[in-house]
């Protein structure tokens, strides 16, 4: 079932188009990756989906309704947004940060109740951060912070999860762990996931569909195995790669034949 | 909150009860010679009448109820207004160096109130209304000067506040220049920040605004946490950022300008108190910071005023005392924490 539909979306900043004619659809329990070089419009697209930016024309439909027609509160019950991890200003505890995910479910003068705490705790457990529950968010690693932000988005109880480069600044282990958790969440809870990635192999290993972006356009949108190939990679990244197969999985690596690997 | 450590609960209780001894201590201090036991007996005899009665002279009663009590209440209300507004603004701007004084709100409110005092003495409420209007105007100027690309960087905001303060202070000098000589002394003394020329009228004209604003901010104290994550995140989490921020800004400006319009410009409380609380209870959670700042802020201004009225044979402006305590404290904070004032 389709949860998110992006229809012929245009966004321009000061007259320069940064996104042109993007069309993508995401179903329940499906993980869609946005793959492309820096400046290809991934973050802009993500902000349009979350109604943080207003498109010039075209629509983002979430659960049958244009995101522009949602109130901020109602949209937050639909979309959980995980921003690129950042240095926070205040030493809130992990628990305090995750609890903030409940704000959309509370009135302006309401304080979080026991059931909000319970939901925050459940979200913390889902991402496996129980032991850091009362630690200041400023004193945990980048990977743990990313997981805390995912837990916060889960506490919103959304239909859709969008993540802006969830693997940026993470070490190898944390990259894989984070992607595994996202993959599992989407399967277990039927959440539609949209995330931007830098590594084509991550898209191949963890996502159901890939939108290959370049210059603000989606140049290909299909299963990652069909989209990520020699020609497309050469076209948008300008490097030669080999596609290899390992236990039935397609993976890519810098081409050895063209001396891209110098050792 | 669900699992507040015991040491934090203890400190919490300590801060919550601290205003009570401070209140009674202040009731005993004053120029008029009144033994402590007599002062307390007079106070309680009125409070517990007719269960408990105490023979006293009208002068003694007047000293307690018309001089000391309104002054004590005003100091406490002022402490609440200044420290809670400071805590709120720091969260709202993710900026440790911000309070109503730094943002120029105090200078603006000061100019507004002095226009009212100097030129519109016959219009009731004019100092309050003008104080709020000019305070809010000053804030808007600082904010829009500092804002670029949706961000308000620390340095820009502080600098903008300095410029706005300078501008409104110049306006104040012009007012002083044109003020009738007979009113001049009043304006000048009031400007230094003092609780000396107050009475019940000052309490009654400022208390409603301070209490209503405090209640609003208190109810939104958890939301302040979310707002402190920045605009984009707060929006994504489902907060109507424009609306909530406006409510908090109006409440802070209202409480500060209501106090300034009766007591003049008193600085540093809004910086010193929330920082002390954050260090003391070790969390940035505004659900604790807001009420605890109110408690400590009321005690701080009350004790500063006690010093102001008892340390010399004449009255010192309490603004001088808060600055003498606040400025070195902040210097220490900056030096010791290496610029990281949050932790």
Image (spheres, coloured by chain):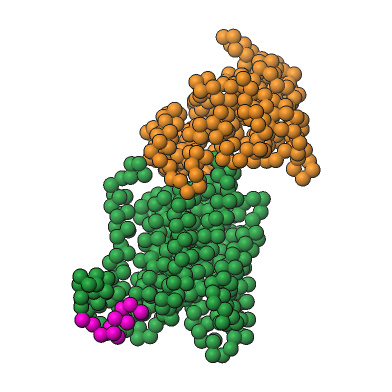
Residue B173's spot in the image, x, y percent?
60, 80
Chain identifier of the green chain: B
Quadrant in which residue B289 is drawn: bottom left
Q: Is residue B57 magenta?
A: yes
Magenta range: B55-67
Q: Residue at x 41, y 71 (%)?
A: B74
Along the viewing direction, whichever of B197 and A35 lies nearer the viewer: B197
Residue B145, quarter of the rendered image: bottom right
Count of numbered badges drawn on the protein:
0
Direction right: furthest residue:
A15
State yes or no: residue B189 in magenta. Answer: no
Q: Determine if residue B48 is in view.
A: yes
Can you see residue A129? Answer: no
At a point 40% along the width and 60% down the height, the residue shown is: B294
* Left or right: B288 in relation to B86: left
Horizontal side of residue A18 vs A96, given as left or right:
right
Please provide percent x and percent y for residue B200: 41, 76
Residue B87: % across, % down: 46, 57
Query: Can you name the residue that lies furthest to the front here?
Result: B50
Magenta portion: prevailing SS class: helix
- Residue farthest top in this picture: A248
As drawn, is A96 to the left or to the right of B68?
Answer: right
Q: Residue at x 64, y 22 (%)?
A: A2
Colour used to depict chain A in the structure image: orange
In this rendering, position of residue A122 left or right of residue A2: left
Q: Position of residue B125 (x, y in %)?
A: 54, 74
- In what quadrant of the picture does the C terminus of chain A appear? top right
Residue farthest along the bottom direction in this orientation: B181
- Viewer-proximal residue among A115 and A260: A115
Q: Of residues B149 and B49, which is closer to you in this image? A: B49
Q: Image point 56% across, 82% down: which residue?
A: B122
Eyeballing the image, is B314 above or below A247?
below
């Amino acid at each position: 079932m389709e949860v998110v539909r992006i229809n012929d979306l245009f966004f321009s900043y000061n007259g320069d188009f940064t996104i042109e004619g993007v069309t993508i659809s995401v179903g329940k329990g499906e993980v869609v990756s946005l793959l492309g070089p820096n400046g290809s419009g991934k973050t802009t697209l993500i902000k349009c989906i979350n109604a943080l930016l207003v498109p010039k024309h075209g629509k983002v439909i979430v659960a049958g309704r244009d995101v522009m027609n949602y109130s901020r509160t109602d949209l937050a019950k639909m979309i959980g947004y995980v921003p690129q991890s950042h240095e926070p200003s205040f030493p809130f505890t992990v628990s305090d940060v995750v609890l903030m995910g409940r704000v959309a479910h509370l009135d302006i003068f309401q304080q979080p109740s026991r059931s909000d705490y319970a939901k925050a705790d459940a979200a913390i457990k889902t991402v496996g951060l129980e032991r850091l529950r009362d630690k200041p968010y400023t004193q945990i690693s980048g990977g743990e912070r990313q997981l805390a932000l995912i837990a916060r988005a889960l506490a919103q109880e959304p239909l859709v999860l969008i993540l802006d480069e969830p693997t940026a600044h993470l070490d190898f282990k944390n990259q894989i762990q984070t992607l595994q958790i996202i993959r599992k969440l989407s399967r277990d809870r039927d959440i539609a996931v949209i995330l931007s990635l830098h590594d084509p192999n991550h898209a191949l290993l963890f996502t159901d569909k890939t939108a290959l972006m370049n210059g603000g356009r989606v140049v290909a949108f299909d299963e990652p195995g069909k989209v990520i190939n020699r020609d497309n990679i050469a076209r948008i990244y300008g490097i030669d790669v080999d596609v290899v197969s390992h236990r039935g999985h397609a993976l890519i690596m810098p081409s050895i034949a063209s001396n891209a690997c110098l050792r | 909150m669900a699992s507040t450590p015991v040491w934090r609960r203890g400190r919490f209780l300590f801060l919550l009860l601290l205003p009570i001894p401070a209140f009674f201590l202040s009731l005993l201090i004053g120029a008029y010679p009144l033994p402590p036991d007599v002062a307390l007996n007079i106070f309680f005899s009125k409070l517990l009448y007719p269960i408990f009665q105490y023979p006293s002279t009208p002068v003694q009663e007047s000293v307690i109820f018309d001089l000391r009590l309104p002054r004590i209440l005003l100091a406490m209300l002022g402490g609440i207004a200044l420290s809670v507004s400071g805590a709120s603004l720091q969260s709202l701007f993710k900026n440790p160096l911000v309070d109503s004084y730094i943002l120029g709100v105090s200078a603006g409110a000061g100019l507004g109130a002095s226009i009212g005092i100097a030129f519109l003495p016959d219009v009731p409420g004019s100092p309050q209304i003008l104080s709020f209007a000019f305070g809010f105007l000053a804030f808007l100027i600082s904010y829009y000067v500092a804002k670029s690309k949706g961000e308000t960087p620390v340095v820009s905001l502080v600098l903008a506040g300095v410029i706005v303060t300078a501008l409104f202070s110049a306006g104040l000098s012009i007012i002083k220049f044109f003020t009738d000589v007979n009113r001049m002394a009043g304006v000048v003394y009031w400007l230094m920040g003092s609780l000396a020329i107050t009475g019940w009228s000052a309490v009654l004209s400022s208390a409603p605004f301070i209490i209503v604003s405090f209640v609003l901010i208190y109810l939104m104290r958890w939301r302040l946490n979310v707002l402190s994550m920045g605009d984009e995140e707060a929006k994504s989490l489902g907060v109507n950022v424009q609306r909530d921020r406006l409510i908090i800004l109006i409440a802070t400006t209202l409480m500060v300008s209501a106090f300034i319009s009766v007591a003049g410009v008193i600085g540093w409380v809004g910086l010193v108190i929330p920082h002390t609380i954050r260090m003391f209870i070790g969390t940035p959670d505004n659900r604790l910071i807001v009420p605890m700042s109110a408690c400590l802020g009321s005690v701080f201004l009350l004790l500063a005023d006690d010093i102001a009225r008892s340390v010399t044979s004449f009255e010192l402006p309490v603004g001088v005392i808060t600055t003498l305590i606040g400025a070195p404290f902040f210097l220490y904070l900056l030096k010791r924490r290496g610029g990281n004032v949050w932790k």
